[in-house]
Structure formats: structure tokens, C-alpha cells
């Protein structure tokens, strides 16, 4: 019950405040730890990548369990509040939404998009920009919202911290290029495992909240993605919008062949992006209502 209440409060805190700019974000600190380990351990081998993952996880796990022990020693109400504020820093729905929403108003869409994706934005047409923004929003609904909540519910504060550490290692090291193809393989595979269930929960949630008749229809195209996870929420979003996402995309100066997800039109417009972003309010309502109702039911049941 404590985990459920912490998750509910953390979600509400993130919804209202987003990032706390007056303190150093813990993801930045985790990123600095990963960079430190990379400098000490880098050699483009799977073994060295494994050593980095083990070192980073050992440090973060130790700190997160120590933090949890310190917090549980506090009075219950203070424990819940402190845990909720810390957990909120590992959620990113408001930040994700605001960053993607900016593409609808800014004049320099390519620069804004470059802050969100690793794709080559210089030669993008407007349709490509909106498509990339929608795909990013869909994929990060899993990485930045549903997956952190999933691990917070299961394993309390250490769960969400360790998950975001795994996710950050993948975002920093999980590239299939000359530097990281072997060194980042363990980080990438571990992230695949960690996101296997949350990505599918995210896709089903999108399908249900948008009242799709076949809630598992995303799976056919979703499994075509190079990632075992990313294609599912992207396909669910495509089915909601009635468009085809995906397709060949330029990364680091070369074209990567990618399948299409969904069967609609391939020209993506600002109205498609706006419609995709309306999911925020549906997800907010669903998460708060479900968590709140379950917590109230369990409280009444126990009492």
C-alpha cells in the first residue's frame, strides 16, 4: 500500500511541477557516474561493458537501498512525502509533454527536435519532424512514465532508481556504432529486458484509452521494430492516429531501413501531433483514478 500511495503522489507531483530546477537532477548525477565508469573501463568489448554495468548498478543499488533505509526510519507521513518527491524526479511525463508540445509553436522546429532525438534533423521535411516527435512521445511514455511507475509499485524507491539507471545506461551507451557496438551491448540488452513488460502495458493502455476495438492489434506491426519493445507503443499510437509511423530514417549520416507501423497515411501533420498529445490527459486521468481507487479500496479493506 505504501508503494501505491508513493506512486500516486509522485505522479501528481510530476504532473504539477515537472522538473525541480533548484536542485541537480538525479539522472544527471547517474549520467556522470556512467561517464566516470566509461573513462575508467572503456574498451570496445562485451566484457568491459559488463564490468561497467556491474559497477554502476552496484553503486546505485547500494545508495538506493541506503536511502530507502534512512527514509523508512522517519515517521510514516514524512517517509511517504520524501519518497514521493524523490520518486517524482524519476518520472518525466510533464517534461516529455512540454518538450514535444514546443514543436507546435516554435519557429525553429529542427533545433527543438534535435534536443529530443538522435536522428539527423537537418534535411527533415515538416512531416518528418512531426513523425519523429510522435514516435518519441509514444516510446517515452513507456521509458519515462509507465516503466518507472511499474518498478516503483513493485520494488519501492530502489526499483524506480535502478530502472532509470538501466535506462540511462542504454541511452548513453546502447548505440550500434563503432564505439559502442560491443561495449554498450550489455546495457542495451538489460534495458530490453527491463522494458519488456512496461512497453506492452503502455501499448495496451494507449489502445484502451483511445477505444480501439482490438486492444492487442498493435502487436503485429510492433514486433517488426528492431527493438523488442519500442515498436509496440509506437504502433499503438499510429493506430490511434490513423497514420503510418516509422519508415526509413537517417541516423549519423546514414539511412536506416525501418518498417512502417500502422496502415494510414504517411504524411504527418501538426494536427496529428496535437491529437497524440491529447493522450496526456487520458493517461493522467487513468493513472490517478486507478491508483487512487485501488488505494482507497485497500485502505477500507484493511481497516
Image (cartoon, helix red, strand yellow):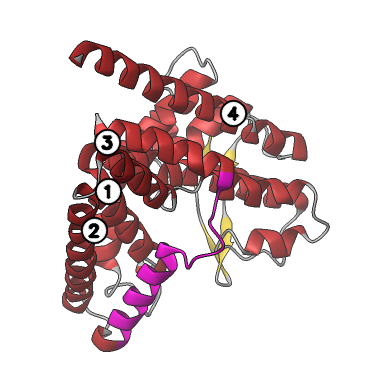
Magenta-drawn stretch contains 167: no
Residue for point 17% across, 67% down:
58
Main SS type for the magenta part?
Answer: helix
Residue for point 71% across, 40% down:
268
Q: Nearer the viewer, mark 4 or mark 3?
A: 3
Question: What residue is pinned by disc 3?
Answer: 3
In the picture, the quarter occupied by the N terminus is top left
Q: Nearer the viewer, mark 4 or mark 1?
A: 1
Q: Is residue 21 visible?
A: yes
Q: Earlier in the sequence, mark 1 or mark 2?
A: 2
Magenta-drawn stretch contains 18: yes
Please tell me whether residue 180 is drawn above or below residue 263 in the rendered image.
below
| Numbered disc 4: secondary structure | helix
Badge number at residue 281:
4
Badge number at residue 157:
1
Q: Using the rendered view, name the quadrant where residue 220 is placed.
A: top left
Between the residue at mark 1 and the residue at mark 2, the CA separation in whole angstroms equals: 9 Å
Between the residue at mark 2 and the residue at mark 3, the CA separation in whole angstroms equals: 15 Å
Image spot of residue 292 (x, y percent): 40, 22
| Crowding at mark 2 (Cα within 10 Å: few <14, some 14-19, many 20+) | some
Foreground pick, 150 / 269: 150
Magenta span covers which residues?
17-39
| Numbered disc 1: secondary structure | helix
Q: Using the rendered view, name the quadrant where residue 196 is placed.
A: top left
Residue for point 29% across, 51% down:
192
Residue for point 61% across, 43% down:
134
Q: Using the rendered view, name the quadrant where residue 8 is placed.
A: top left
| Numbered disc 3: secondary structure | helix
Image spot of residue 94 (x, y percent): 57, 45
Amino acid at each position: 500500500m505504501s508503494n501505491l500511495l508513493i506512486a500516486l503522489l509522485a505522479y501528481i507531483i510530476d504532473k504539477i511541477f515537472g522538473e525541480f530546477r533548484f536542485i541537480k537532477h538525479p539522472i544527471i548525477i547517474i549520467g556522470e557516474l556512467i561517464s566516470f565508469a566509461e573513462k575508467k573501463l572503456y574498451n570496445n568489448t562485451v566484457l568491459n561493458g559488463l564490468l561497467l554495468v556491474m559497477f554502476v548498478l552496484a553503486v546505485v543499488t547500494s545508495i538506493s537501498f541506503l536511502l530507502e533505509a534512512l527514509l523508512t526510519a522517519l515517521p510514516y507521513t514524512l517517509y511517504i512525502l520524501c519518497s514521493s518527491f524523490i520518486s517524482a524526479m524519476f518520472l518525466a511525463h510533464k517534461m516529455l509533454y512540454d518538450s514535444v508540445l514546443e514543436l507546435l509553436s516554435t519557429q525553429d522546429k529542427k533545433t527543438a527536435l534535435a534536443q529530443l532525438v538522435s536522428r539527423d534533423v537537418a534535411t527533415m521535411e515538416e512531416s518528418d519532424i512531426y513523425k519523429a516527435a510522435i514516435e518519441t512521445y509514444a516510446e517515452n511514455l513507456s521509458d519515462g512514465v509507465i516503466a518507472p511507475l511499474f518498478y516503483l509499485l513493485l520494488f519501492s524507491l530502489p526499483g524506480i532508481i535502478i530502472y532509470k539507471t538501466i535506462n540511462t545506461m542504454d541511452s548513453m551507451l546502447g548505440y550500434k556504432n563503432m564505439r559502442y557496438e560491443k561495449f554498450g551491448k550489455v546495457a542495451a540488452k538489460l534495458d530490453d529486458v527491463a522494458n519488456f513488460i512496461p512497453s506492452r502495458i503502455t501499448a495496451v493502455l494507449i489502445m484502451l484509452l483511445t477505444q480501439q476495438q482490438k486492444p492487442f492489434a498493435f502487436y503485429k506491426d510492433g514486433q517488426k521494430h528492431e527493438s523488442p519493445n519500442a515498436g509496440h507503443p509506437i504502433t499503438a499510437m499510429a493506430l490511434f492516429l490513423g497514420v503510418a509511423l516509422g519508415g526509413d530514417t537517417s541516423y549519423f549520416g546514414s539511412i536506416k531501413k525501418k518498417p512502417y507501423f500502422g496502415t494510414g497515411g504517411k504524411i504527418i501533420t501538426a494536427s496529428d501531433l496535437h491529437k497524440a498529445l491529447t493522450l496526456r490527459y487520458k493517461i493522467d486521468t487513468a493513472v490517478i483514478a486507478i491508483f487512487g481507487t485501488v488505494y482507497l479500496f485497500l485502505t477500507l479493506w484493511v481497516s
